[in-house]
Image (cartoon, grey):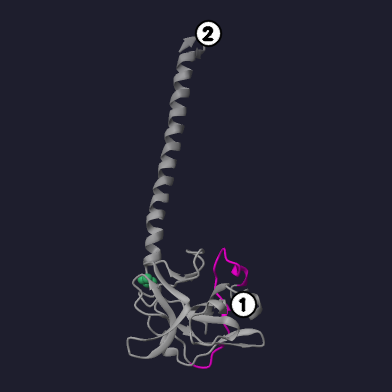
Amino acid sequence: MTTDDCGCNKKTDIQEDKEDINENGLKRRGFLNYLLSLTGLAFFASVLSPLKMLVPPEPLKILAGDLDNTLKYAKSDGTWYSEKAGEEVSASDFETGAGAAVIWRGSIPAILIKLDQDRLNTAVELEQGFAAFCSRCTHLCCVANWHLDRPEMDMIYCRCHDGIVDPYNIVETETEKGELYYGAKVVGGPVPRAFPMIPVEIIDGKILGVPSNLDLYNYC
Ligand code: FES
């Protein structure tokens, strides 16, 4: 510090430079700390997010009784039907090969696909090529998807343990209780048995599930 003509104390250029450096250093350190916390948060998010996917969802509630059987679009961001969440499914919404996550009877998650009938490998007859399958995985009940994680393959895919079932290959199989049903054949992963089909009918252009045997979906 120096004294000028008026007797005032004045900081030298060197002192001012030092203070600037200290201040900038503090700002830089603060910024680095901020970056480190962001990186830490991003790291935890990246570790926890896949783990969250591996946690099976709540047990499925199968509601018996006289309920609306019309399939409704499920919420699914980034899909062709994302704006239709909660709306009734119309047959005319689907091009051949298109599929959507839907909800049946208010609680049962399913995948509805308009299958290309030339590629079908099944004795089951489908109205206009529509087939619906319960999307709760028969392994540990995670909800599987169509064309979300594996858009390049026409398979229903369960991200929890890479389970894969083929909706074009509808086979007769049996539950753990020995009950026979038709479902999408297992082609990959630890999935123990086919995803059960939900029979559908088309009434006035709307697609409805037929509750012929609700027990078949009661495995989660
Ligand atoms: S829960 Fe679907 S593969 Fe395990």
Q: On the rendering, which quadrant does ligand 1 occupy? A: bottom left
Q: Amino acid at mark 2?
A: Asp
Q: Is residue 43 above or below residue 6?
A: below
Residue placed most toward the observer, 149 or 26: 149
Q: Residues within 10 Å of mark 1 (few under 14, many from 20)?
A: some
The residue lying at 38 percent from left, 78 percent from top is 138
x and y percentages locating residue 67 in the rendered image:
54, 90
Name the N-terminal-most of marks 2 and 1: 2
The dot on residue 87 is 1
Position of the C terminus by quadrant: bottom left
Q: Quadrant of the N terminus?
A: top left
Q: Which residue is mark 2?
A: 4
Residue lying furthest front: 118
Up-down relation of residue 202 to residue 150 (above or below): below
Q: In 3D space, how far apart are the residues under numbered discs 2 and 1 (Cα atoms)?
A: 81 Å
Residue in the image at 66% along x and 78% along y? 92
- Determine whether, in the image, residue 182 is placed left or right of residue 177: right
Q: Given the image, on which type of amino acid does mark 1 rest?
A: Glu
Is 87 magenta? The answer is no
Label 1: element kind = loop
The answer to whether the residues at label 2 and label 1 have Cβ atoms under 8 Å apart is: no
**x then y, percent, for residue 58:** 40, 75
Tell me the crowding category of disc 2: few under 14, some 14 to 19, or many 20 or more residues within 10 angstroms, Cα based. few
Q: Is 77 part of what is drawn in magenta?
A: yes
| In the displayed structure image, the side of residue 116 where residue 149 appears, left or right | left
Q: Residue furthest top?
A: 5
Name the residue nearer the viewer: 6 or 173: 173
Q: Which residues are drawn in magenta? A: 65-84
